[in-house]
Image (cartoon, helix red, strand yellow):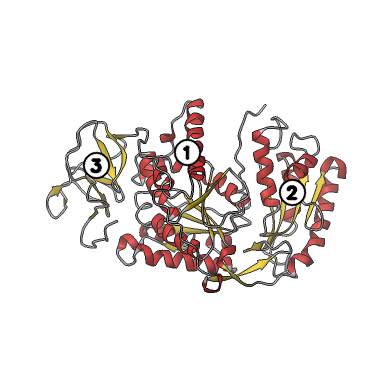
Amino acid sequence: MAEIDLLSPTLRLNPADPLVLALRDLAAGDSIENGKVRVQEAIGKGHKVAVKAIAAGETVRKYGQIIGVATKAIAPGQHIHTHNLEFRPSTADHSIGADRRNEPPLPEAEAATFQGIVRADGTVATRNYIGILTTVNCSATVARIIADQFRGAQALADYPNVDGVVALTHTDGCAGASEGEPIDLLRRTIAGYAKHPNFAAVLIIGLGCEANQMNRLVESQGIPVGDRIHTFVMQEVGGTNATVRAGVERIKQMLPAANAVKRQTLPAKHLTVGLQCGGSDGFSGITANPALGAAVDLLVKNGGTAILSETPEIYGAEHMLLRRAASQQVGQKLIDLLKWWEDYAATNNASLDNNPSPGNKAGGLSTILEKSLGAAAKGGSADMVEVYRYAEPVTARGFVFMDTPGYDPVSATGQVAGGANLICFTTGRGSCYGCKPSPSLKLATNTPMYQRMKDDMDINCGEIADGTATVQEMGERIFKMMLETASGKKSRSEEYGYGDDEFAPWHLGATF
């Protein structure tokens, strides 16, 4: 990407592009490209303006990559957006492994460190919660009533090392098949949270007659019920009041051991960071996403793991990931996922180009191809060493991909179930999000939004567009913030208490 020229109202991203990006609102008659082009209509900040004549039916490029096809002739100075640009399926070359680097991480003695919590099984936590999970929506109210008994500063005053007692409930677990992919996915998600090191202890509550039976959940997922993980079934315990009383008492018994933790210096290889973008805009692909990508490269260099997800939002940019695949097998896994998503969209009479939301489009993004090119930048440039199913335990170290929908709460839920102990979330429109039990950092793509919503944002990557920071400098700041947050510093969303309601397992299959 070219350097920002503070005196120019536009940014050229690639010499081959027939367009530039508006760095500020442009009015009809404004002069751009050193006086070579006159703007023909009002064009918003972050939107695209043509600087060359584009014929109807001609492919249009941004970042040097195809983002769509012109539906009508576009003259220099005109706005390029959904009214004259349409999606066409990507025809990019799917070469696998062509850009693989095979670079080893730094020796552990030279790697960055953070202050983490080591659990008895050797896993590492960045937070120290007690969790209450549910097999089914029918036990959600009881889980919340129990958690409510431990809210407020005084409730946990004697346990300063406990970050909180949180009930993570959902709307699934019954009215579907008792076996098969949909319920397997739900069980895998619940199990990933139950085993997550950011929970010091967990209580799982079921109703008793649901499709997602407690014994089948525990057996199928190998959940180690015992000192750390406990289960209650309401119909066996005696109903609402009896289960609430038993649950509160069990949490009280958990608290002393949960409080008896100490943070210690640990290498960055114990960090697993989920990468998210939501409320994207025209600046996402030039500021926050590539800056997060630079931070990811530093994380991987220091032995850590980064999880890129949101499969529909890398559609059209998959060739950039495939060229970094560590093997043919890894690359083929990603190709197979994209084929599944194409079939899934067709089965539901939809298109993957439905993905850009109204907010995305208002921010300057026109097609899923354009959105994907920016979204993929979050993954940096390291080798893609593995591809995982939704909520599957992530065991590889380095840069990996996990299959998830593009909907942020569902996507991040899968990443945390897979083991992410930190989330980094870029946003251009101002998404507000938290993800207990893992802290979530919010990275703003532009300064005006950051200034409006700075109580929700952790860092302003808009400085890149302002010309006051480079992508690499911002990446180093993000990596430093990752380490600080993993060491216990609260994120903005944590200060507000976000994360209880954002637990959203991916629902597949029919509800009967």
Q: Which residue is mark 1?
A: 335
* Sooner in the amino-acid sequence: mark 3 or mark 2: 3
Residue at the spot 70% in from the left edge and 30% down from the top edge: 175
Question: Is 88 positioned to the left or the right of 255 in the image?
Answer: left
Question: Is there any visible trace of residue 428 in the rendered image?
Answer: no
Residue, disc 2: 143
Sort mark 3 into few (<14), some (14-19) or many (20+) by Cα contacts within 10 Å: many
At a point 69% along the width and 42% down the height, the residue shown is: 187
**Lower position in the chain sequence, tag 3 or tag 1:** 3
- Residue type of the residue flagged with mark 2: Ala
Q: Amino acid at mark 3?
A: His
Q: Is residue 314 left or right of residue 35?
A: right
Residue 253 or 265: which is nearer the viewer?
Answer: 265
SS state under label 2? helix
Going from N to C along the chain, the mark reached first, 1 or 2, is 2
Q: In which quadrant is the C terminus drawn?
A: top right
Instruction: Indicate whether 390 appears above or below 226.
Output: above
Cβ atoms under marks 1 and 2 closer than 8 Å: no
User: In the image, which is nearer the foreground, mark 3 or mark 1?
Assistant: 1
State which mark lies toward you, 1 or 2.
Answer: 1
In the rendered image, the vertical position of residue 337 relative to residue 512, given as above or below: below
Residue placed under numbered mark 3 in the picture: 79
Given residues 88 and 77, the one toward you in this image is 88
Residue 467 screen position, x and y as percent: 29, 64
Left or right of 512? Residue 273 is: left
Residue drawn at (34%, 65%), measured in percent from left and top?
Answer: 470
Find numbered disc 3 in the image and state the secondary structure of the residue it sits on. strand
